[in-house]
Amino acid sequence: MRVEDKKVVTIDYTLRDPQGTVIDTSEGNEPMPYLHGASNIIPGLEKQLAGKQAGDSVKAVIEPNDAYGPRNDEAVQDVPRSQFPPNIDIQQGMQFQANTPQGPRLVTEIGVTDENVKIDANHPLAGVTLHFDVKIVGVRDATAEEIQHGHVHGPGGHHHH
């Protein structure tokens, strides 16, 4: 069975940055299932896996435009310290969820003064060329419920959290 839309694809993967540093891996964990064609993984990797089958290995280099996009300098801004709870010890690298006109967004604190907190709303991998080593472990037809919901369900069906 080939990787195509409406198939549940299970992969083992290792993701590295351009310097070869491991960013993420399934090694030591269960393989990761995703619903192909439902935007569950970055578009560039989905394109690279299309048409492959269980047992295939893929080395893929994904440019930022097919991953998390280019960095946007306008996504870095100063927010008044008064907009944060006074009892939080804000440390560089902390992440917060911010409510934006586009919905909730994860932001990273990159600097703090008594007056302002500098935040970066770019995805941490924005602007980074990603290097994937992927082994396709399995491919199966998605259930009607998985297709309707747009994601893979675990054994025994869907569980809301």
Image: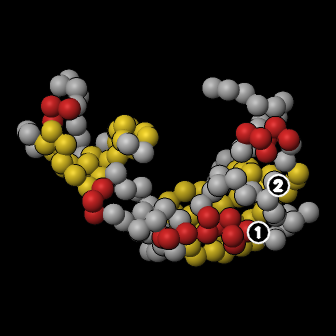
- Amino acid beneath label 2: Lys
Picture mark count: 2
Describe residue 24's horizontal placement relative to residue 6 as left or right: left
Give the colour scheme shown: secondary structure
Dot placed on the residue nearer the N-terminal end, 1 or 2: 2
Describe residue 28's horizontal placement relative to residue 130 as left or right: right
Residue 80 x/y as whole percent = 15, 39
Looking at the image, which residue is at 69% across and 72% down? 48
Q: Measure the alpha-carbon separation of dots 1 and 2.
A: 10 Å
Vertical placement of residue 159 versus 55, above or below = above
Residue 158 x/y as whole percent = 76, 31
Badge 2: few (under 14), some or many (20 or more) residues near its Cα, within 10 Å?
A: many
Placement of the N terminus among the 4 image quadrants:
bottom right
Residue 27 x/y as whole percent = 65, 55
Looking at the image, which residue is at 44% across and 61% down? 125
Badge 1: few (under 14), some or many (20 or more) residues near its Cα, within 10 Å?
A: some
Does the rendering let one see residue 153? yes
Foreground residue among 121 and 100: 100
Where residue 59 sits, quadrant-wise, is bottom right
Residue that protrudes farthest toward the right in the picture: 1
Helix, strand or loop under label 2: strand
Looking at the image, which residue is at 44% across and 74% down? 19
Looking at the image, which residue is at 63% across and 26% down? 161
The residue under label 1 is: 50
- Amino acid beneath label 1: Ala
Where residue 3 sits, quadrant-wise, is bottom right
Per the rendering, the mark at residue 7 is 2
Foreground residue among 154 and 28: 154
Residue 130 x/y as whole percent = 52, 69
Describe residue 69's horizontal placement relative to residue 79 as left or right: right
Helix, strand or loop under label 1: loop
Per the rendering, the mark at residue 67 is none
